[in-house]
Image (tube, rainbow, N blue to C red):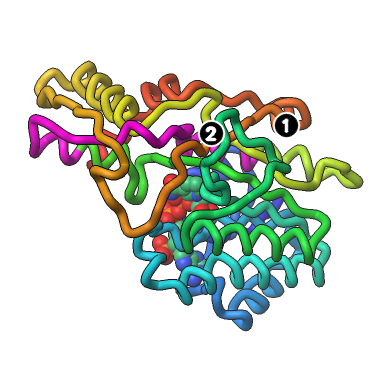
Amino acid sequence: MKILLVGGTGQVGSEIRLVCHNKNITCISPSSSELDITDKASVHSIIKNNLPLDFIVNASAYTAVDKAEDEVELAYKINRDGPLQLAEVCAQNTIPLLHISTDYVFDGSASTPYKENDATSALGVYGQSKLEGEFAVRDILLEHIILRTAWVYGAQGNNFVKTMLKLGRQRTELNVVSDQFGCPTAAVDIAETVVNIITQMRYKPDSRWGTYHFCSGDSTHWADFAKAIFTDAKCLDSEYPSVAVNSISSSEYPTKAARPHYSVLSCTKIEQLFAIAAPTWLSSLQRDIPNILKNI
Ligand SMILES: NC(=O)c1ccc[n+]([C@@H]2O[C@H](COP(=O)([O-])OP(=O)(O)OC[C@H]3O[C@@H](n4cnc5c(N)ncnc54)[C@H](OP(=O)(O)O)[C@@H]3O)[C@@H](O)[C@H]2O)c1
């Protein structure tokens, strides 16, 4: 099996490369300077030069949620126009596309986990640009999987777990928001899921194309997530400082972009159609934190 991965240096992309390596899947993973998703000519030529391909996986994105409010044009170029271009080349060359999206396509007004066909309504530029990327993929290409995930963390890149672990070494007390609920998801688990899906989907015809949610199977808020991070860090390293976490509301921690108060995703569909079970957030955190701690 041979795939082309866009965004292979990111949190999720770097784990996808590793899973492919372990499963003997050929993963062509050009850097963003070799394949700039905003540059139509580069997208076309890299893909054409690497045919035949069993799948294209798009793990690239503009992910700076607050900065996107100022860099609106760039966010739309990467998150909407990029997937659109990928979908066009996929359609021309009959290659299926797995595109990763986000829980931030929802506004958080629900009180039960969002299902794939629930109404979307993003609160900020990041969420809206990702939502329009989804629309583009769906419009152009039947053979697509859109995989929405949430609250991603891993050993690579920037994320909440790494931020907390670094701050915990500098401060004895931290204020963390406790009125935003979501599903912390390990990049490792997303990568396993991506490779599982593309492996299952290579045998055509298949009726399972469409949109899926994958994240941890249970939810929490940022303050409880932070407490678990510090408890685990202390268990692993007795010299890691004790950090007190104070719960605050979002209004006490204003950010440039509004975030949904509730972006919990239901993973029932992926479990039923692909037999992929969503792990609990604490079990994945406990598995991955030793590696993350080594990398900060
Ligand atoms: N992070 C989260 O909490 C979160 C939550 C929900 C959903 N998601 C979604 O999950 C997916 C993966 O996110 P992530 O956290 O792994 O992202 P990330 O760590 O920010 O990595 C983004 C990747 O996109 C690449 N990229 C950026 N601009 C590009 C361009 N113009 N052309 C080609 N590649 C470009 C980056 O390359 P360089 O390193 O070279 O810049 C990097 O490899 C995204 O679709 C994101 O929307 C993320």
Which quadrant is home to the C terminus?
top left
Where is residue 124 drawn, in percent x and y?
47, 59
Q: Amino acid at mark 2?
A: Val
Where is residue 141 drawn, in percent x and y?
79, 62
Determine if residue 31 is in view: no
Left or right: 186 with respect to 202? left
SS label for mark 1: helix
What's the residue at 62%, 80% (across, down)? 40
Judging by the rendered image, the residue that carries numbered circle 1 is 269
Left or right: 118 with respect to 93? left
SS label for mark 2: loop
Where is residue 15 drawn, in percent x and y?
48, 43
Q: How many other residues sit within 10 Å of disc 2, few (<14), some (14-19) or many (≥20)? A: many
**Which residues, given as a range, are shown in magenta?**
166-195
Whether residue 191 is in magenta: the answer is yes
Judging by the rendered image, the residue that carries numbered circle 2 is 264
